Image (tube, rainbow, N blue to C red):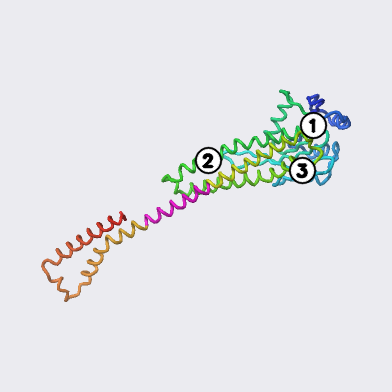
Amino acid sequence: MIRSFVFSDGKLASQDLAIEALRLVRADKGLILWIDLDNPTDEEIKTILEGVFEFHPLTIEDCVTPSSLPKIEDYEDYLFLVMHAVDFSRTDKFATTELDLFIGKDYLVTFHRAPLKSVQSAIERVTKGAGFLARGPDRLAHTVLDLLVDNYTPIMSELAGELEEIEESVLAKESSSQAFIAEILKVRGDFSQLRAIAGPQRDVIERLARGENKLIRPVMLPYFRDLRDNLVRFDATAASYHERLMMAFDIFLNKAAFEANEGIKFLTALTAVTLPAVVVGGWYGMNFDRMPELHSAHGYFWASTGTIIVTFLMVLYLKKRKWF
């Protein structure tokens, strides 16, 4: 689907134009054009990217081919950005959607294969007005990217909630289950994936914030620096959450080792308690004919009494050592 928006003096003038009308708008240097390609067909891709804008073939190839890493390429008369929007819920894993941006002197082209909240929110701002002024493509690009980064906030809240639940239950009885270990490993993977996404995007925004390209006006540099700072903060927060998770995992491992030691100690104590009975039973169980105790009238009594007394003394000793 192709959506187009034309701005004059920062305000929306028209939208959803025909292809021939888009060519006329491209020729008018006083207008700003934003085209959003939402899961376009091959024909739409060729018409817009090759026909209307005549982008470099390598750029078009990078655009239509999914990429796992953000990037920025400077083609002098336009900038090409590859970014990733993130969606997350406790029931599903991370869902990332690639967002490609072409930032020119008087146009912005966005390309994505799935619906994006950030793009839809930007379109709503543009169509409803609400004081939004599109003075340049860099302002439009910043709006889309800013909304994309804002979507990290609910993700961090969800992950923080999962982390707090793990920290609260790490000392609980049920925390020794295999399901709990799987949950820790899953959340650890979520934090690692979030950092793997946010870190490279921070580097891309850093290049825009430094003003290395003339297509980013000086007036917009503070806004991109603020965007970079937000990504830095998210990355630092994710790193701190990851450290807390590893601390909880260490506590869990120490608890498991402690419980194992307690089990071994109990079995050792049980063995020590039963040792007198085993020794006496083994001794008198040999049944040698010349053992004097076998011919005594009170042999059974003395053997039983001795076994009970020694066992009782062994229990008292173990209790004193706090093995029970």
The C terminus, quarter of image: bottom left
Depth check, mark 2 against mark 1: the one in front is 1
Q: Position of residue 217 (x, y in %)?
A: 79, 35
| Gap in angstroms between the C-alphas marked 2 and 1 | 41 Å
The residue pinned by badge 3 equals 63
Q: Is residue 246 magenta?
A: yes
Q: Is the magenta stretch mostly helix, strand or loop?
A: helix
* N-term-proximal mark, 2 vs 1: 1
The N terminus, quarter of image: top right
Quick one: which residue is furthest to the bottom in this view? 290
| Marks 2 & 3, CB-CB < 8 Å contact | no
The residue pinned by badge 2 equals 162
| Marks 2 & 1, CB-CB < 8 Å contact | no
Label 2 sits on a secondary structure element that is helix
Give the amino acid at mark 3.
Answer: Cys
Q: Position of residue 285 (x, y in %)?
A: 22, 69
- Residue drawn at x 80%, y 44% is 74
Q: Give the range drawn in magenta.
A: 245-263
The residue pinned by badge 1 equals 136
The image quarter in which residue 230 lies = top right
